[in-house]
Image (cartoon, helix red, strand yellow):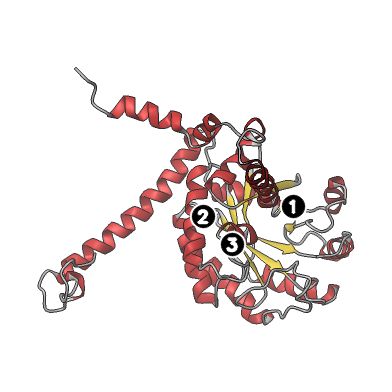
Amino acid sequence: SRCACVGSEPLSNNPQNPESHNTAKMMATTSALRTAVRSTSTRAFSSVVGKSVSKSTQLKRMLNSDKLEFLMEAHNGLSARIAEEAGFKGIWGSGLSISASLGVRDSNEASWTQVLEVLEYMSDATTAPILLDADTGYGNFNNARRLVRKLESRGVAGACMEDKLFPKTNSLLDSRPNQPLADINEFSMKIRACKDAQTDPDFCVVARVEAFIAGWDLQEALRRAHAYADAGADAVLIHSKKKDPSDIEAFMKAWKNRAPVVIVPTNYYTTPTDRFRELGISTVIWANHNLRSCITAMQDTSKKIFEAQSLEPVEKKIATVKEVFRLQRDDELREAEEKYLPKGE
């Protein structure tokens, strides 16, 4: 779409060029076709591997299941595939993990388009639905609804947005107490804008309530959760950084199962999982543990190789190169080459 000649305008931007209008229409049609093909291929691929429903429908069914469901964190295509191979039915596209894997802070230093590119690789690598940790929606309602449309086009099943201010601050940062929250009406309308913008009726918008994180009480958490459910949220995520589940227990007692509730037990990890079942929790997110485990592994491997000036101490303790090729689906490429490359005489 760009002209290669210095000092000239692109054809589609030149109003005096008689072909300008037709070219612009062709470009718009091509863009629409690409989106349609991507959406269709996502559903078709799920069908090929035995899943007859779209990723968004899979996620919606998980959120509304009468059984406790789980989402496993991933931050790139490889980790997403590993999570799915382990047996997880859904994946959490963690904002913390994606930003850390890019070497930046979890403060919206990575743009939403950079995050979207990572999500595209994750979606292409898996058949399981992905719920993106979409922070605050990367701006106001207009940014958020545009994000929803772009996620749909990449086959991402849902977005979880938190009621804090842009740029976001990670909820578990001890050095950031009393984090400011978004205006409840403004955030409710952001949720509504996202629901109105989606074209897939099963795309899920989860409203993340940060009242407990910001130091507010149960009544404020309930007030916000009810407002977001009224705005059309498919579920609410109730976040707490306490070392015990008391915030969650109090909320669930008062909530009375009005809508599915998602939790992130990173800090209260010693709570037995059956307790979450007793409370009627919909979905548990294991939020950052693939990232943290690979950090530990890479630190250990790098230290050992540096100190030994040799690969011998680590070679038998790490994945083989063959395993890397397997995770990259090299077998599929070899089959395709056999099918599509011309054979020698």
Q: CA distance from mark 3 to mark 1?
A: 27 Å
Quick one: label 2, few (<14), some, or many (20+) residues within 10 Å? many
Identify the residue shown where x is 48% and y is 51%: 155
Callout 1: SS: loop
Query: In the displayed structure, would residue 249 be above or below residue 322?
Result: below
Query: Residue 68: x and y, percent?
Result: 76, 46
Q: Indicate the amino acid at tag 1.
A: Ser
**Residue 126 vs residue 181: left or right?**
left
Q: Which residue is mark 2?
A: 119
The quarter of the displayed image where residue 316 is located: top right
Tell me the CA gap for discs 2 and 1: 24 Å
Q: Which one is in front, 50 or 214?
A: 214
The residue pinned by badge 3 equals 99
Up-down relation of residue 145 to residue 204 (above or below): below
Which quarter of the rendered picture does the N terminus lie within?
A: bottom left
Q: Residue at x 28, y 63 (%)?
A: 28
Which amino acid, by three-letter code, is at mark 3? Ser
For marks 2 and 3, give the CA distance: 12 Å
Mark 1 nearby-residue class (10 Å; few <14, some 14–19, many ≥20): many
Q: Position of residue 82 (x, y in %)?
A: 60, 40
Residue at the top extreme of this rendering = 345
Q: Is residue 158 left or right of residue 272?
A: left
Identify the residue under disc 1: 282
In the rendered view of the protein, which quadrant contains the C terminus? top left
Query: Helix, strand, or loop for circle 2?
Result: helix
The answer to which of marks 2 and 1 sits earlier in the sequence is 2
At horizontal 38% and vertical 26% (from top left) the residue drawn is 335
